[in-house]
């Protein structure tokens, strides 16, 4: 994981020469998507004007060359596409290599009526810490909800668990109320969700958490600009 709000992960670009002769030179060019920022690679490539490039002098028949490109997602709430396409050029021939990532996230809100469902008059809660890990317990990233209570992670395909941290004097509302997963709360009493499995290109925006707290009621009313009076 990188600094709060961002996530780093690796793209692996693999090029195999099936024959019948050696290929040379081989140049891989990857114009990174707007949501991804180049961090490093393991083959001494270069990054210029938004594009990563690496060259191999030759790839023998049956040989595979790989390059691992580490990127940082600087806008995990972006709705832009999650496809990263690189090109592999061998002499005058050019081929495309496409990789796709996934997104998960959504919303933390104050459940005023404590029914475990998101109602139109209920508001999001900002600055709630959200932690993402694999099902093996490996930390992937951490961030906090924005001013509207929203959050999101862009990740490689895989299985993940979300852990919400309740603010002081707050608890989580009832889990999995009703039959519509889009408007319920997925956090258990500890703030942890069940595992979510994502394929390449998936966008799961149904992982939410409802909070119960009198303190949050006061803050939410204040944010709406409603006057208060003594007594």
Image (cartoon, rainbow, N blue to C red):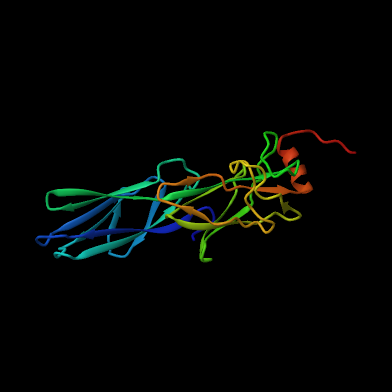
Asked whether, in this view, residue 97 is left or right of residue 141, the answer is left
Q: Is residue 186 left or right of residue 50?
A: right
* Residue visible at 67% across and 45% down in the picture: 177
Q: Is residue 75 left or right of residue 178?
A: left
The residue lying at 29 percent from left, 62 percent from top is: 67
- Image coordinates for residue 21, horizontal then vertical, percent: 9, 61
**Residue at image x 75%, y 44%?**
114
Image x and y of residue 154, in percent = 46, 51
How many numbered marks are there? Answer: 0
Instruction: Quadrant for residue 41, please give it.
Output: bottom left
Q: Position of residue 116 (x, y in %)?
A: 69, 45
Residue 217 vertical placement versus 121 (above, below): below
Q: Residue furthest right?
A: 231
Q: Position of residue 227 (x, y in %)?
A: 79, 33
Looking at the image, residue 224 lies above or below residue 213: above
Asked whether 82 or 53 is in front, the reply is 82
Whether residue 188 is situated above or below residue 126 in the rendered picture: below
- The C terminus appears in which quarter of the rendering? top right
């Amino acid at each position: 994981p990188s600094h709060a709000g961002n996530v780093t992960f690796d793209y692996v670009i693999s090029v195999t020469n099936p024959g019948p002769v050696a290929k040379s030179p081989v140049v891989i060019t990857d114009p990174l998507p707007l949501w991804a920022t180049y961090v490093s690679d393991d083959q001494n490539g270069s990054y210029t004007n938004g594009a990563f490039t690496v060259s191999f002098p030759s790839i023998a028949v049956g040989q595979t060359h790989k390059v691992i490109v580490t990127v940082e997602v600087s806008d995990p709430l972006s709705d832009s596409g999650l496809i990263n396409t690189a090109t592999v050029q061998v002499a005058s021939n050019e081929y495309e290599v496409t990789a796709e990532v996934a997104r998960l996230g959504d919303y933390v809100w104050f459940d005023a009526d404590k029914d475990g469902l998101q109602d139109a008059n209920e508001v999001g809660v900002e600055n709630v810490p959200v932690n993402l890990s694999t099902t093996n317990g490996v930390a992937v990233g951490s961030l906090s909800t924005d001013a509207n209570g929203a959050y999101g992670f862009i990740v490689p395909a895989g299985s993940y668990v979300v852990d919400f941290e309740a603010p002081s004097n707050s608890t989580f509302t009832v889990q999995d109320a009703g039959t519509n997963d889009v408007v319920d709360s997925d956090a258990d009493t500890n703030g942890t969700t069940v595992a979510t499995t994502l394929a390449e290109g998936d966008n799961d925006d149904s992982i939410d958490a409802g909070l119960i707290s009198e303190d949050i009621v006061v803050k939410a009313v204040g944010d709406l600009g409603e006057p208060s009076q003594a007594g």
